[in-house]
Amino acid sequence: MKSIAAFLVVVLIWVAGLLAFAGRVQQSTPSPVPEPADGVVALTGANSNLRIAAAMALLQDGMGERLLISGVNRDATREDIRNVSKPARRLYDCCVDLGFTAADTVGNARETADWARGMRYESLIIVTADYHMPRAMLELRAVMREPEFHLQTYAVPTPSLRGRRWWRSPRSARLMVVEYCKYLAILGREAVLGLGPREPAPGSVQDSAAKQ
């Protein structure tokens, strides 16, 4: 009986966490207008066209000097991406960088960090889907810690998750549950890493001192 009770408690905690996560996702949009930053970053994935279009609109509004589209399919060309985002060619040719190395969210974070350091940017606006934003920010903050970087979020709404009864749709419920489980896994990883000494962020004062 004790084991059953403990199991039920765990299930209730998990469900409560899922509902809180879903509420956080739904409340993240519409996103407030961000403050101008050095750069804008769009993380590709499901409904990439919506993410890229939102990031391009921020660039066109002068919210950043350049835009990185991270995780572009290696078979895609610059013209393919331009056809999706449909920006002014002048702005696209001068101010949009494509990242082809990222294959997942961890890769997005590393690609974004490398790009920001290469451009000497300290502030970024991160654009991705609403459900993906919590996990993306965990990964980004693992490699782009303050005060070296200031990150703002700009979540793009996922139409299938906008209704309050998203759980009635098998597709929407699966999307939310899978993303919540991935989020918990990253939280657990960061909690374990936090128990030991953290390696200094590349390029930081502590990192430079350690190399001397």
Image (tube, helix red, strand yellow):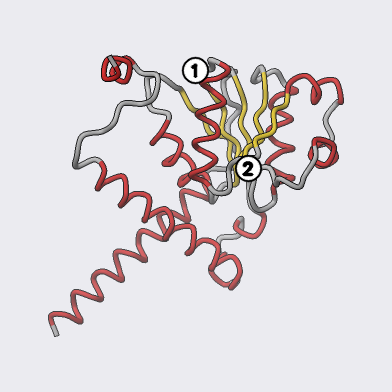
What is the quadrant of residue 59 in the picture? top right
Q: Position of residue 65 (x, y in %)?
A: 66, 17
Q: Residue at x 55, y 34 (%)?
A: 111
Q: Secondary structure at mark 1?
A: loop
- The amino acid type found where label 1 is placed reads Glu
Q: Secondary structure at mark 2?
A: loop
Q: Is residue 138 above or below residue 150?
A: below
Is residue 198 or residue 89 the one in the foreground?
198
Q: Position of residue 17 (x, y in %)?
A: 36, 58
| Residue designated by label 1 | 122
Q: Residue at x 51, y 20 (%)?
A: 117
Q: Earlier in the sequence, mark 2 or mark 1?
A: 2
Q: Looking at the figure, which quarter contains the C terminus?
A: top left
Residue at the limit of the structure toward the front, as seen here: 212
Question: What is the distance, in whole Å, between disc 2 and disc 1 at their CAs?
Answer: 21 Å
| Residue designated by label 2 | 71
Residue at the limit of the structure toward the left, as seen here: 2
